[in-house]
Amino acid sequence: MDTIAFHTFGCKLNFSETSTLSRMFQEKGFKKTSISQKPKKIIINTCSVTENADKKCEELIKKIKKKSPKSNITVIGCFAQLNPKKILKINGVDKVLGNKEKFDIDNYINKSNNKLHSNIKESIHFKSSFSINDRTRSFLKIQDGCNYGCSFCTIPLARGKSRSNNIKSIIKNILEISKNNVQEIVLTGINIGDFGIQNGRRKERLIDLLREIEKLNKINRYRISSIEPNLLSDEIIEFILNSNKFLPHFHIPLQSGNNKILKSMGRRYKKELYKNKVNKIKKMMPDACIGADVIVGYPEESKSNFNKTYKFINDLNIDYMHVFPYSERKNTRSSTLKKTILTTEKNTRSKMLRILSEKKKRFFYNKNLNSIKNVLFEKDVKNNFIYGFTENYIRVKTKFEEKIINKIIPCNLNFIDSDGIVEVNKLVY
């Protein structure tokens, strides 16, 4: 039996696609294993959001070839779509497939002698994918691509235009996922607030999908992975407030707290709209968790611009941030801007916001101590502790018991440990 291993870089969407490809190969008789076991074939699903993501892929390939020189390596995903010739120059790469070709990967690996297959003509067709058994939660892809064209972003180049699955097929996927004792599904996509475009035309809406999912009795918990602030409608916020299944957790990209920079980025909102959305959520759902993405060191972001962003976020009622130093990408509008920020300055700004993020998260955790929350415990076990997340996305741990893996348990949130994780007491088995 041929062996195969997978490695995924990047977002939840990539994980859902890798999982789907993994099941496809196993159905064809391959045995899934780890890279350390020196499998016959290795599939690397790449990200290319930042320059660092590209470097991580190159480093992994070199490491694999050193330890497992006979393994056949195929590279797929966004890095493979954007810069396939660069990947082919890496010693040890056997095939490179673009984002369209990766879903027909078996034919390319076994029936083609060509190393490169990356069709620059984008597809408007949606390819369904979801994860099973890789993690406790399942990632379900409902949308792909993006029509926004933000100045710093290569995703439209890598993934093409916005397109979606249809509600009927998504419900079918959820029913399939439910057969595997999954307790929570995360709806993923590139721009899921833009859900509903099929064959180039808008046919459905995200709120329509959420309402249909709410009717199902198979899965207990759902999260929306990330949604643009201008697409997070009051209708969606109010729906989640009254939902029995969708959890009070919002991840809303901000990118900058300065309107001048937001405009240069090509973002479709001002900071005032963002603040209004956050305030509305917190007023309606005080315990809801709100996260944000922020880019620092964008070209032309002066110290004054950054200080305005810092003050805006400091005053904003969000609970954590993902902070990214700006990374210049080829063929983006921002790469043509003249004023650039030194790496040392970008690192300083990143550190300031990450410290602020930790303070905000600790404040949020403290506010929730001594309350009872429902925790989905995951498979990870470290130092005899098992970990999980509350419905409002607080990371918790308790003494390991095998019987609570993949179970939703009411817990009392006791205290925050030295690693910033909340230790809990289980109330019901």
Image (cartoon, grey):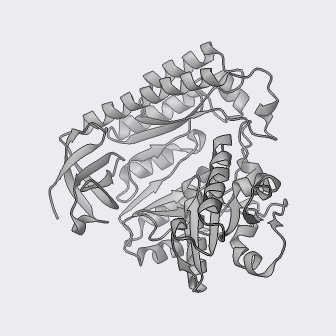
Toward the viewer: 167 or 379? 379
Toward the viewer: 41 or 97? 41
Task: Count the labels in the image.
Answer: 0
Residue that extends furthest to the top in the rendered view of this protein:
304
Residue 94 in the image: x percent, y percent?
75, 67
Task: State the image quarter where residue 104 is shown.
Answer: bottom right
- Left or right: where does residue 234 sit relative to residue 111? left
Residue 113 in the image: x percent, y percent?
83, 76
Residue 124 in the image: x percent, y percent?
76, 63
Toward the viewer: 115 or 187? 115
- Left or right: where does residue 278 sit relative to residue 386? right
- Left or right: where does residue 174 sit relative to residue 299? left
Residue 105 visible in rendering: yes
Above or below, comparing residue 396 to residue 133 in the picture = above
Residue 215 in the image: x percent, y percent?
42, 68
Q: Is the C terminus in the top left, top right, bottom left or bottom right quadrant?
A: bottom left
Toward the viewer: 70 or 87? 70
Task: State the image quarter where residue 268 is shown.
Answer: top right
- Residue depicted at x 75% and y 58%: 91
Above or below, comparing residue 6 to residue 205 in the picture = below
- Left or right: where does residue 209 sit relative to residue 393? right
Above or below, comparing residue 88 to residue 102 in the picture = above
Residue 161 visible in rendering: no
- Residue depicted at x 61% and y 13%: 304
Above or below, comparing residue 328 to residue 304 in the picture = below
- Residue depicted at x 41% and y 76%: 180
- Residue depicted at x 61% and y 66%: 68
Q: Is the N terminus in the top left, top right, bottom left or bottom right quadrant?
A: bottom right
